[in-house]
Each structure stands twice: as structure tokens, then as C-alpha cells.
Amino acid sequence: MKVLVTGASGLLGGETARLLVRQGHEVTTFQRRPSGVDGATDLPGSVTDDAALRRAVDGAEGVIHLAAKVSFTGRAAEFDEVNVEGTRRLLAASRGAGVRDFVFVSSPSVANSGAAIAGLGAEPADPVRAHGDYSRTKAEAELLALAADGPDFRVAAVRPHIVWGPGDTQLVERVLERAAQGRLPLLDAGAALIDTTYVDNAASAIVAALHRMEHIRGRALVVTNGEPRPVGELLAGICAAGSVRPPAWSVPGRLARAAGSVVEKVWLRAGRSDEPPMTRFLAEQLSTAHWFDQRETRKLLHWTPGVSLDEGLAKLAEHYRNR
């Protein structure tokens, strides 16, 4: 199969493209900087460029769309342009090129209003209730994608939850950096039960979705490791893998959420491009339960995680020892 993967310079996009190459597919990667995926044809470009998108989808049978603006802060217009309009442009280019299958890689945050999640499936995406511009625009983009599903253009959404692994700069590196500086608190003593997804498992689920479009078209599926653990235990495991002292001080979650809202506004008004130390969304993620029922996902995808949480932490520790 000839497959286009957007956003392959990121951790999950790169692993997804590498898995497709290993399976023998003809893979093209499309992103603003080189993907570094051996065996794939690398095309530079942006999802905001219609001409570049038409070149990227030419001849493709399947598209896996991971490219997005991922941040806790930033101007709303930037999120809209990349996440919503970029998806709209890619959908149009894909249909025009005769692409058969389109997998939109989404996020469980598209259906999360900040309340605890305990054992739910993939609730409908809701841009109005989603917290933050990233979640809002991913929700809008997911709705656009699923609405495009039709007889000759099969579309499904996969929502990997908190993806991490060796080389991860979004979660792992930030945890280790802040823990090493003593700036990483536990919220509500780190007791919230959360689930995450090791990167290899997230990639294999996305590729499984491409192969199971007949059974999942028009639907959204949440993907996790299926091993909920207290957030404090998970952070301690990451810190141990990176040989950093784990966080030992606690802040009330209610206070962190309020402070995060203030910090977001300060960062935005100052026009800062770096990530703030705390946001309301981040505080919610660290202080409320969020784990999902994986039975339907595994049944529909004919998929199970290949790497357990403990095995993933061992691989992370090996990565830091070798580095």
C-alpha cells in the first residue's frame, strides 16, 4: 500500500512511519522538517500549503494524519490554521487524489471538559466543552474528518492517550528537567489514576486502524496501554528511568488549576513561545482520573499492546543509560 504520513518528524509520527516501512508499505512522509525515517520518501511542506498537499497525496492509497500544532499555549489563530484548516485542506486534497483510507490521529482531550474519566470509551468530540485551543481545534478537526467519511473515502479517528517513550520531548524530557530542578510538584499527592500509551503501542494501533477501516470507518477509538496507575507512580517511574530524584512535594489540585489559568493568560499577553510551567489543562491532567475502557478498541482493531508499562519504563531506562 502507498501511504502518506503527515507529522512524521514527531515521536509518534516517526514510529508510525517506521512501522509501515517494516511492514513493506511504500511510505511518504510530509512535514516541515526532515523526518529521519529510513526507507521513506521525505517531502518537506506544511498542511497550510494546498499545492504541497496535492503533491504529497498524489498516488497515495492511505493517509495517516498526525501533523498538528501541539502546545499548552499560543495564539488561537495558529491552532485554527494548522489543526482545523490544515485538516480541511488535507481532506480535500486526499479526496481529489482518490485516496481510499484516511486515519485522523486525534486526542481523548477532544471529549474532556476537565472532569474525571473512569472507564469510559470514546465520547463524542465537543469543541465547545474542550479545554484549551489545542483540544478545541483537534475536536473541530476530528468532526470534520469523520463527517467526510463516505462510500469511496473511508475515514476513522484514533485517539492515543498520553504517548511517551524514548526520545519523547513533550512529556518525558519535561518531567525529568523539572524534577531535576525541583520544580515538579505532585498534585493532590499524585493519587489520580491515569492511563498512558507507550509509543510503540500507539503506532501499532494507528497502523492497525489503517488495515481495519472496513470495520471502524466513521468512528473514533481511544487507545491506551490499558494499565491505569497513580500519576505519582508514573512520574516516579519516569524519574527512575532518567536517574532523577522523583517529586516529593504536593500542591492541592484546586490551587494548581487556578494558578494554571493565570499563568496561561500571562504567557499569552507576554507573547512567549516557550511552554509555561503550569496551565489549567496540565493541572487537570495531573489531578483528575483519566482512564478508558479498551475492550471495544481492541476488538475492533484486532489489536493488543505489545509493550507493557513496566517494559516501556525499562526501555526508557536503557535509552538514558546508552545516551
Image: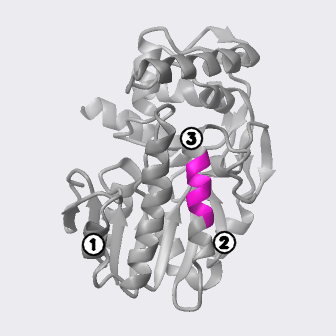
Q: Where in the figure is residue 312, as x and y percent of width and height? A: 47, 44
Q: Which residue is mark 3?
A: 133
Q: Position of residue 222 (x, y in %)?
A: 64, 58
Image quadrant where one finds the N terminus: bottom left
- The residue range painted magenta reads 136-143
Q: As drawn, is 156 to the left or to the right of 73?
A: right
Q: As drawn, which residue projects farthest toward the bottom?
A: 151
Q: Residues within 10 Å of mark 1 (few under 14, many from 20)?
A: many
Answer left or right for 203 relative to 300: left
Discs 1/3, front: 3
Residue 213 is a magenta residue: no
Q: Quadrant of the C terminus?
A: top left
Report the magenta stretch's main SS.
Answer: helix
Q: Element type at marker 2?
A: loop
- Tell which of 146 and 206 is nearer to you: 146
The residue pinned by badge 2 equals: 219
**What residue is rendered at 37% in x and 48% in y?**
11
Indicate the quadrant where residue 112 lies. Answer: top right
Per the model, the C-alpha gap separating discs 3 and 2 is: 23 Å
First of labels 1, 3 by sequence position: 1
* Residue drawn at point x = 25 percent, y = 59 percent: 45
Q: Is residue 212 visible?
A: no
Which of the marked residues, 3 or 2, is nearer the chain's N terminus? 3
> From mark 1 to mark 3, how far is it between C-alphas?
27 Å
Q: Is residue 158 or residue 264 the one in the foreground?
A: 264
Question: What secondary structure is found at the residue carrying circle 3?
Answer: helix
Instruction: Determine which residue is flagged by label 1.
Output: 56
Tag 2: residue type? Answer: Arg
What's under tag 3, amino acid-wise? Answer: Asp
Say which residue appears at 55% left-offset and 76% top-offset.
155
